[in-house]
Image (cartoon, grey):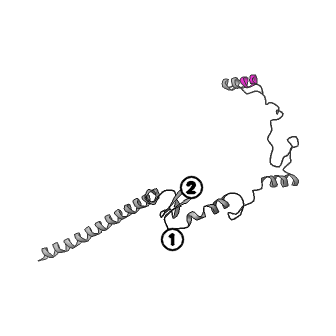
């Protein structure tokens, strides 16, 4: 379809008229279906051979386990496995590796490039813990207030009975 035909179709659609008659397929404009190697020879997927070709073409890729020793994450994990090994009590909590300084972070339980004092996770956990403690303190204050009120009511009732 050339530019003039596209413009004519657009004008007809804007005017609310029926579009042009369908155009015959253009050579070179095709989509192969799974298993189809040649666009000029469509496959019949209702036959047993067509079903077999379809199933082979659309079969899921084989599963690769995470423990496989191939390219990718396996080697990367081995390279950085030392980051999860905590320092012993007599060892330094700072070390150099690949021209970078790493610090042991207790919050992450790993060697990180930030120091433990700069750890955002540690600060977040401490804030949550303080929030939990303040909630617990409020609850214990309310419980204490209630028990004092009960004791005061008991004393007042004893005084009124006398």
The residue at 84%/53% (across/down) is: 53
Image position of 89 with respect to 127: above or below: below
Q: Which quarter of the rendered picture does the C terminus lie within?
A: bottom left
Q: Which of 137 and 71 is in front in this view?
A: 71
Q: How many marks?
A: 2
43 left or right, relative to 118: right
Magenta-colored span: 1-8
Q: Which of 19 and 111 is in front in this view?
A: 111
Counting other residues with Cα less than 10 Å from the Cα at mark 1, is it few (<14), some (14-19), or many (20 or more)?
few
128 left or right, relative to 86: left
Precedes in sequence: disc 2 or disc 1 = 1
Horizontal and vertical percent position of residue 48: 87, 55
The residue at 81%/55% (across/down) is: 56
The residue at 80%/30% (across/down) is: 23
124 left or right, relative to 141: right
Assign the magenta stretch its main secondary structure. helix
Quarter of the image for residue 8 reads: top right
Asked if residue 47 lies in the magenta stretch, the reply is no
Q: Which mark is residue 88?
A: 1
Horizontal and vertical percent position of residue 136: 35, 66
Secondary structure type for disc 2: loop
How far apart are labels 2 and 1 at the CA level?
A: 22 Å
Quarter of the image for residue 73 reads: bottom right
The residue at 13%/75% (across/down) is: 159
Q: Which mark is residue 99?
A: 2
Secondary structure type for disc 1: loop
Asked if residue 4 lies in the magenta stretch, the reply is yes
């Amino acid at each position: 379809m050339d530019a003039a035909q596209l413009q004519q179709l657009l004008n007809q659609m804007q005017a609310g008229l029926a579009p042009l008659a369908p155009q015959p397929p253009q050579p070179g404009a095709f989509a192969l279906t799974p298993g189809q190697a040649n666009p000029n020879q469509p496959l019949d997927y209702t036959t047993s051979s067509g079903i077999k070709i379809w199933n082979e073409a659309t079969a899921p890729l084989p599963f690769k386990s995470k423990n496989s020793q191939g390219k990718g994450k396996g080697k990367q994990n081995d390279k950085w496995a030392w980051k999860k090994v905590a320092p012993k009590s007599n060892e330094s909590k700072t070390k150099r590796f690949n021209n970078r300084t790493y610090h042991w972070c207790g919050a992450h339980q790993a060697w990180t490039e930030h120091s433990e004092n700069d750890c955002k996770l540690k600060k977040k956990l401490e804030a949550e813990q303080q929030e939990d403690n303040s909630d617990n303190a409020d609850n214990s204050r309310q419980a204490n207030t209630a028990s004092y009120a009960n004791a005061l009511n008991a004393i007042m009732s004893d005084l009124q009975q006398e």
